[in-house]
Amino acid sequence: MLTEVWLKANNGKPRDKVTEIADRDGMSVRISPKGKIVFQLRYRFNGKLKRFDLGVYPLISLKQAREKSLSAKTQLLHGKDPKLEEQIAKQAYINADTFYECFLQWYDKSAVITKKQASDIKRSFELYVFPVIGSLPINDITLQQYIIIIESISEKTPGIAERILTNTKQMLKWAKKREIVTHNILADLELSDFNLFRVKRKRYLSDDEIILFYKALYGSKISYRNRLATELALMFGCRGIELRRAKITDFQDGVWTVPPENHKVGHITQQPLIRPILPPMQALIDEAIAISRSEYLFDRRGEMLEKNAFLDITAGLIHWIDRHCSIQLPRFTFHDLRRTARTNFSAFTSRDIAEIMIGHTVGNMQQVYDHYNYLPQQTAAYEQWLKKLAELKQVAL
């Protein structure tokens, strides 16, 4: 019977020919002329004599080889060929979805459809996750590997760490339902486990900042198209995607109809958003139509604007204000114009009407049964909001 001492003494020791030395229970070692020791199991399957290599010493120990031999003999008792079973397992490992492949499936079939910042999410994974575990079979990635990634970036960029944890959990949940992964290994992890907390953005422009906004909007070198889109965004309190996807035919008879596929909650309500168009809005819409080269209100070379078309507009305005007004305005985004409108709507109408104006659902019952568009109430609120904007614009210009 073999011992570790004997194996250690004979490993790498040259021989005249290949030698086999028995251990127990059908296991033996095969030693090459150069002294390489391979654990093996000889057995019969379907009447044929076969050999199953268990591993090379000292990469696996004598104890490990015996355990593997015993496991193989158990498979034989169940009518399975251990050599074939190992080949199947290796092929399954080769064919397994990697983290990167799983992410792309989730991204294309779910994230792009449901998340407005899908491209930003993908970029974060490209920078911080794919280089580390992207090529690994997703079912073999350990909890500790995920934790190391998140902890490594949580101190410097907690927002990115929150994004990666939240979206990885969602991806694994999606993949488990489709049997791509066996379980969601991150299901029990929370943001608080990493001292991460989701902070809801509250930035909106004060009246004085709106004045500076108008100064920059008309004083900077912003393109004509972007100026029109930005001013309309502040007037309507709409999302950027609603403007990007808007077609000229959506603006008719004093009403802007936003189809369900063009707004965030459309896939839930299956209803369009209906907004009144007041004269100041119509004037800007007419200007946009005059320069459009396609069916879209705003286009680029005859095509619908790309996803990030409005992304850098406000950064340019802030830079202009800093340079020409010597005021360092706190950062605001294109989406913050929407929050600015919503904040002001509260002074002119009820909470429910204000929510309807920006395209939010107002409770499940209303969402299902209340299809009244509240145009008169919206019009009354917009009239007061546009009056205020006109006064601030006059101060600015």
Image (cartoon, grey):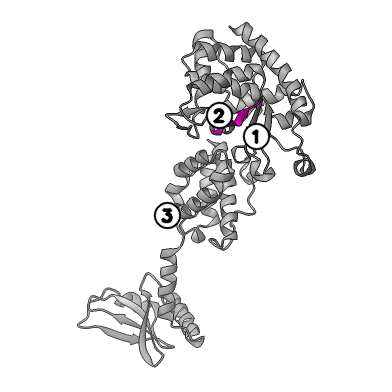
Q: In the rendered view, does 110 fall on the left or right side of 6?
A: right
The residue depicted at 67 percent of the width and 9 percent of the height is 391
Q: Amino acid at mark 1?
A: Val
- Assess whether residue 381 is covered by the magenta stretch: no
Residue holding disc 2: 248
Q: Nearer the viewer, residue 373 or 7?
A: 373
Q: Nearer the viewer, residue 204 or 36?
A: 204
Would you place residue 44 above or below residue 270 in this image?
Answer: below
**Mark 2 packing: few (<14 Cα in 10 Å), some, or many (20+)?**
some
- Assess whether residue 247 is covered by the magenta stretch: yes
| Quadrant in the picture for residue 231 | top right
The residue depicted at 59 percent of the width and 17 percent of the height is 283
Q: Determine the secondary structure under disc 2.
A: helix
Q: Position of residue 358 (x, y in %)?
A: 68, 30
* First in residue order: circle 1 vs circle 3: 3
The disc placed on residue 135 is 3
Q: Give the magenta part as a residue range.
A: 245-253
Which callout, 2 or 1, points to the residue nearer the camera? 2
Q: Amino acid at mark 3?
A: Ser
Q: Quadrant of the C terminus?
A: top right
